[in-house]
């Protein structure tokens, strides 16, 4: 807020010389939700809590502000009912989002990303941002990764991985939205606290020769962290999505998935520095499978990734039926599926064992035992120790006296050869 040349107080930011009210831009985000949600579906108690005021005088709003506040294309608009007065008198974005889009849903994730995209559109056209050395590049990178994130959400929205992916994205999206709103407010404060001549001097002669102000530098760093978090989620899907394209599994919209993989390939070079937290699972074929920890929050998600990797390998049908166990490579103790979210930590190495039920002729103490790795029938082997060394692949498997089962542990490719 500054004094104008005629002594009047003026509020708002400026884009290309035109005044843009920040409260108006932020209110557009709330109004956007009203347009998406049918009015008769808004709970009565929410409507009564926030009384709407008469429409604001649109004569005081310039064309630039109106353009920035327009909702996304394709959204049907009801008669305008934008209120006057501060945004805090009305329903907050979080209230609308949480009321109509439960946590962990793809719709919630897509709404969060759309809000971020709208705020970023306003930021990118803000003249105060043009002289920043870092922020435009950071925001451009963030826009690209958000586009990739939206494609990933649409591709996996009807799959078992949708909830895990959405939860990870929602948590970061909420944080990112607050940072962007803070940046928008900071740019406005910077613009209004100084005269136009002084601001021009600072931009041209100070920011260009020294580092940016501490507040902007801090926000830039935090926004880069947000970019890294979004990118980590996308990279977690990258290799798995490529496998699904190759398999043609039908569990996702393959056309959307193809577009995601194409854009992912284009962006992969710029994302090489992003670190992904994974656990390594050594499967029954001695392959090292990197499972992102974002999919280790529940046994259901973990199982989806494991069965996907092993779908067309030997023993894949058994794994599809859940006939396998996971054990720690350190103490060789089996991990209870209910404990997987607390036990698994980034960097851990695990081993996978297949569980088989043998016919009566191949029970413990019998003379023939089929190797679960290569299906070779081992005849006349000694089974006192319950361990059998396959004569074909040199892998070891255990004959279990309980439930007539055979367990074949992976052993980091060694198999006690």
Image (cartoon, rainbow, N blue to C red):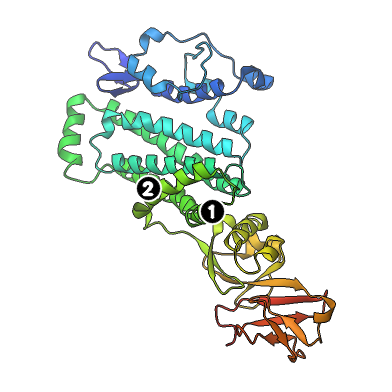
Q: Quadrant of the N terminus?
A: top left
* Residue with the mark numbered 2: 224
Q: Which residue is mark 1?
A: 244
Q: Position of residue 6 (x, y in %)?
A: 24, 10
Tell me residue 65's x, y (percent).
36, 19
Whether residue 139 is visible: yes
**Which quadrant would residue 279 be assigned to in this image?**
bottom right
Give the class, few, some or many, for how many residues have Cα within 10 Å of label 1's Cα (few <14, many ≥20): some
Q: Which residue appears at 26% of the width and 12% of the height?
A: 7
Q: Residue 11 got which mark? A: none
Out of 412 and 25, give the one closest to the viewer: 412
The answer to whether residue 363 of the structure is visible from this angle is no
* Residue 291, image x, y percentages: 55, 61
Secondary structure at badge 2 equals helix
Question: Of tags 1 and 2, which is closer to the observer?
Answer: 1
Q: Nearer the viewer, residue 372 or 182?
A: 372
Label 1 – label 2 distance at C-alpha: 30 Å
Could you say whether the residue bearing mark 1 is in a helix, strand or loop? helix
């Amino acid at each position: 807020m500054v004094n104008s040349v005629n002594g009047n107080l003026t509020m708002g930011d400026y884009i290309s010389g035109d005044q843009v009210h920040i409260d108006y831009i932020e209110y557009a985000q709330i109004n956007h939700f009203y347009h998406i949600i049918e009015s008769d579906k808004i709970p009565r108690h929410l409507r009564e809590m926030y009384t709407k005021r008469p429409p604001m005088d649109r004569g005081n709003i310039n064309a630039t502000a109106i353009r920035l506040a327009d909702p996304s294309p394709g959204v049907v608009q009801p008669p305008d009912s934008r209120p006057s007065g501060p945004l805090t008198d009305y329903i907050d974005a979080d209230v609308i989002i949480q009321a109509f889009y439960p946590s962990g849903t793809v719709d919630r994730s897509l709404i969060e990303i759309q809000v971020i995209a709208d705020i970023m559109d306003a930021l990118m056209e803000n003249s105060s941002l043009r002289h920043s050395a870092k922020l435009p590049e950071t925001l451009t990178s963030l826009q690209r990764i958000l586009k990739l994130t939206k494609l990933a959400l649409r591709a996996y929205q009807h799959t078992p991985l949708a909830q895990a992916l959405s939860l990870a994205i929602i948590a970061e999206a909420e944080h990112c939205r607050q940072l962007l709103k803070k940046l928008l407010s900071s740019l406005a404060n910077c613009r209004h606290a100084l005269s136009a001549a002084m601001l021009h001097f600072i931009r041209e002669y100070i920011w260009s020769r020294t580092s940016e102000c501490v507040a902007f530098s801090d926000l830039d760093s935090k926004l880069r962290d947000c970019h890294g978090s979004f990118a980590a989620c996308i990279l977690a899907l990258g290799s798995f999505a490529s496998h699904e394209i190759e398999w043609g599994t039908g569990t996702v919209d393959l056309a959307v998935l193809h577009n995601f993989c194409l854009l992912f390939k284009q962006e992969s070079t710029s994302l090489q520095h992003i670190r992904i937290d994974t656990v390594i699972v050594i499967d029954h074929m001695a392959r090292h499978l990197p499972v992102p920890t974002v999919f280790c929050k529940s046994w259901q998600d973990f199982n989806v990734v494991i069965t996907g990797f092993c779908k067309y390998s030997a023993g894949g049908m058994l794994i599809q039926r859940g006939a396998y166990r996971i054990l720690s490579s350190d103490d060789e103790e089996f991990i209870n599926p209910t404990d997987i979210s607390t036990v698994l930590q980034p960097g851990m190495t695990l081993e996978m064992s297949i569980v088989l039920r043998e016919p009566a002729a191949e029970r413990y103490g019998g003379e023939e035992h089929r190797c679960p790795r290569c299906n070779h029938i081992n005849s006349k082997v000694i089974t006192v120790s319950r361990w059998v060394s396959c004569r074909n692949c040199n892998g070891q498997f255990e004959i279990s006296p309980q439930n007539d089962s055979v367990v074949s542990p992976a052993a980091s490719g060694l198999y006690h050869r």
